[in-house]
Image (tube, grey):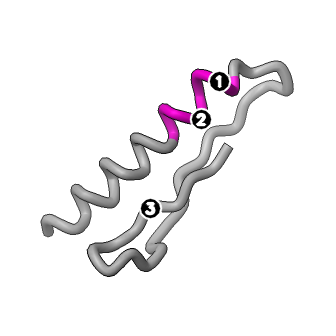
Amino acid sequence: VVSPYRDSEQRIIGVLGVIGPTRMAYDRVIPIVDVTAKLLGAALNRQ
């Protein structure tokens, strides 16, 4: 499961991902990865 994180101009500056088992709880992991990538992008834009 991967999600890009972006700068203030919406350019992709990196990708956050999780490696897990085949039977991972994707319905729980996907939103967590998405929110974490957004928070990381926002934190990097503040610098």
Structural crowding at the residue carrying mark 2, measured as other residues with C-alpha within 10 Å and reported as few (<14), some (14–19) or many (≥20): some
- Measure the alpha-carbon separation of dots 1 and 2: 6 Å
**In the rendered image of this protein, does residue 41 appear above or below residue 8?**
above
Instruction: Say which amino acid is labelled 3.
Output: Tyr
| Count of labels in the image | 3
Give the residue at the far right of this rendering.
22
- Measure the alpha-carbon separation of dots 3 and 2: 14 Å
- In depth, the one of 21 and 34 nearer the eye is 34
Disc 3 target residue: 5
**In magenta segment, residue 46:** no
- Residues rendered magenta in the picture: 26-33
- Label whose residue precedes the other's in the sequence (3 or 2): 3
Position of residue 32 measured from the top left corner of the image (x, y, whole percent): 48, 32
Comparing marks 3 and 1, which lies closer to the viewer?
Answer: 1
Q: Main secondary structure of the magenta part?
A: helix
**In magenta segment, residue 29:** yes
**In the rendered image of this protein, does residue 13 appear above or below residue 17?**
below
What label does residue 30 carry, if any?
A: 2
What SS does tag 3 mark? strand
- Measure the alpha-carbon separation of dots 3 and 1: 20 Å
Structural crowding at the residue carrying mark 1, measured as other residues with C-alpha within 10 Å and reported as few (<14), some (14–19) or many (≥20): few
Give the residue at the far left of this rendering.
47
Q: Are marks 1 and 2 in contact (CB under 8 Å)?
A: yes
Instruction: Say which amino acid is labelled 1.
Output: Asp
**In the rendered image of this protein, does residue 40 appear above or below residue 5?**
above
What label does residue 27 carry, if any?
A: 1
Q: Are marks 3 and 1 in contact (CB under 8 Å)?
A: no
Q: Quadrant of residue 29?
A: top right
Q: Are marks 3 and 2 in contact (CB under 8 Å)?
A: no
Instruction: Say which amino acid is labelled 2.
Output: Ile
